[in-house]
Amino acid sequence: MRWVPPALLVLVWAGLVIASGGSPWSAAGSQFMLMATVGCWLTVAVGNVDDAPHRELLVAAAGSAARLHTSRALAAATIGGVVAVATALLAAVATGCAPQQPCPPFKLAADTPSLVALEIAGVLVGVAIGTFLHRPVVGHLGVTTLVAVASLIALIVVEPTRDLLGRFGRGDATAGYLAVALAVPVAAVAVAAASRLAVRRT
């Protein structure tokens, strides 16, 4: 049941964005926060998938709490990446042919990787947030929820994010590549730091 809410969120949000009939760039930009939310949710869900005794067994199998924490972040990023690619391609196909803002096929084909890059960046940012919010780093679900919501709100209101999404929405394909170029090191540093905390909290 833990996978039902994010699945419904993706379907409903993607449906609303596509139904709006905007350009592929505005659709993908609107889905950035969706992907960040999904990435955070997946990371927390994967991290909290088992109880303490089972996690201790997995720590022994993995070799350390840090390795287990890192592997779970990678698993969440992989699942989220698949979702990100699917939603980006759906936005490209469904909105690229919208009569309100027709998109030439050659232009759509050239810029589709940028749409995918932006959505993957959203997932990675979500993983960077979520990796600090599950056991053994944080064991209280209420704290996890509050911090996750506050972090996602802060993400969308800060000027760099708004500027980047604004540029992307206007058709600047380089913004998508810049977003993923920034998100990769941020996620890597966050997972490394959270993995160290996991060792201390185990």
Image (cartoon, helix red, strand yellow):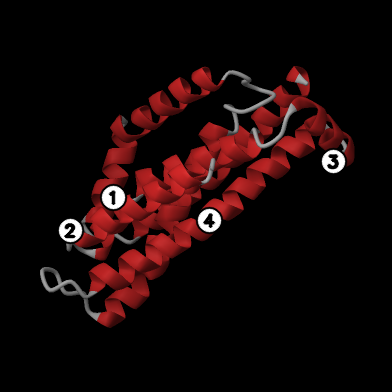
Instruction: Name the residue nearer the viewer: 127 or 56.
Output: 56
Left or right: where 35 falls relative to 66: left
Q: Secondary structure at mark 1?
A: helix
Q: Amino acid at mark 1?
A: Ser
Q: Is residue 182 visible?
A: no
Residue identifier under label 3: 62
Q: Amino acid at mark 2?
A: Ser
Q: Is residue 132 shown to the viewer in this render?
A: yes
Q: Earlier in the sequence, mark 3 or mark 2?
A: 2
User: Of callouts 1 and 4, which one flags the residue occurring earlier in the amino acid sequence?
Assistant: 1
Q: CA distance from mark 1 to mark 2?
A: 11 Å
Indicate the amino acid at tag 3.
Ala
Q: Mark 4 highlights which residue? A: 81
Mark 1 = which residue?
Answer: 30
Disc on res. 20:
2
Q: Earlier in the sequence, mark 1 or mark 3?
A: 1
- Spatial CA span between label 4 and label 2: 24 Å
| Side (left or right) of 202 relative to 132 | right
